Amino acid sequence: MAITVGLALLLLALVALIGALRLRASAGLPWAPVVYRDTDAQSPERPLIARRIGLVGKPDYLIQKRGRLIPVEVKPGRNATRPYESDLMQLAAYCLLLEETTGVAPPYGLLCYADRTFRLSYTAQVRQETLALIEEMRAALDNECDRSHDDPARCLGCGFFSMCDQALRR
Amino acid sequence: MPGPRLPIIRASEIGEYVYCARAWWLRRVAGLEPEERARREYGTTLHHRHARSVALSRLFAIIAALLGTLALALLIGGWMAG
Ligand code: SF4
């Protein structure tokens, strides 16, 4: 009797494990402990603050892999075969924040779109580019900032389209 | 002695600036609000759904571990008794 019940429970355990792995895979996250989650309205996390460089932010998740923290940015409504530069730079900013606040640079960050997850290697060059962007933005706070592309499709998808004097109209 | 406080930049602003520097400036400096409320709300819903999947996957893993442990205890006990 005990053996029959034991086998039934073992089967149920297997079903639960497969369910767990499938759910995690559908979320685009690797199987690793989640130590920070800002996607939940009930328990909003505190932002990471790097006063030295004047940068703040809340990554969607921080997961732990081989003892290192990895930032994860989730764009569940986005479908694309290549990651957007804007999303990659936002993720790079989380990598920089993590480095500044913990003293340990993450080896990479993850960007989860609806059905694909991309990896951004956090190299010295990415770090430099992110710092340069922050400097550029800070300088732009005191100046008028112009459109930085020539892509009408981008304007069409922009929330400022109807009120922007520099919008590109087809 | 600490230097003057730097104006704070949010990580999400960096994404916006790379998308279009003007869009970032219109919001941050000119103080305009983009017309994308419906899309933003939908994005929030998707984020919550994502969080639920991640939390559920953890719950299922805990259930699997508990059931597995119980199953092994029963199987070992059964074999030893039999
Ligand atoms: S509508 Fe204006 S702010 Fe938006 S992308 Fe076009 S130029 Fe930039």
Image: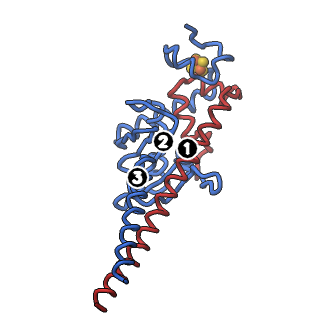
Q: In the image, is residue A5 above or below residue B31?
A: below
Depth check, mark 2 against mark 1: the one in front is 2
In this rendered view, identify the residue nearer to me: B14 or B75: B75
The answer to whether the residues at label 2 and label 1 have Cβ atoms under 8 Å apart is: yes
Residue at left offset 62%, top offset 37%: B42
Q: The disc numbered 3 marks a residue on which chain? A: A
Q: Residues within 10 Å of mark 3 (few under 14, many from 20)?
A: some
Q: Which residue is mark 2?
A: A93
Q: Position of residue A100 (x, y in %)?
A: 47, 51
Q: In the image, is residue A20 above or below residue A151?
A: below
Q: Which residue is mark 1?
A: A55
Name the element at disc 2. helix
Chain seen in red: B
Q: Position of residue B38 (x, y in %)?
A: 66, 32
The answer to whether the residues at label 1 and label 3 have Cβ atoms under 8 Å apart is: no
Answer with left or right where residue B32 lies relative to residue A140. Answer: right
Residue at left offset 69%, top offset 25%: B30
Q: Position of residue A31 (x, y in %)?
A: 38, 56
Disc 2/disc 1 C-alpha distance (Å)? 8 Å
Looking at numbered disc 3 in the image, what kind of residue is underneath it? Arg
Q: In the image, is residue B57 above or below residue A149?
A: below
The answer to whether the residues at label 3 and label 2 have Cβ atoms under 8 Å apart is: no
Q: Which numbered marker is on residue A22? A: 3
Is ligand 1 less than 8 Å from the beta carbon at label 2?
A: no
Name the element at disc 1. strand
Disc 1/disc 3 C-alpha distance (Å)? 36 Å
Chain seen in blue: A
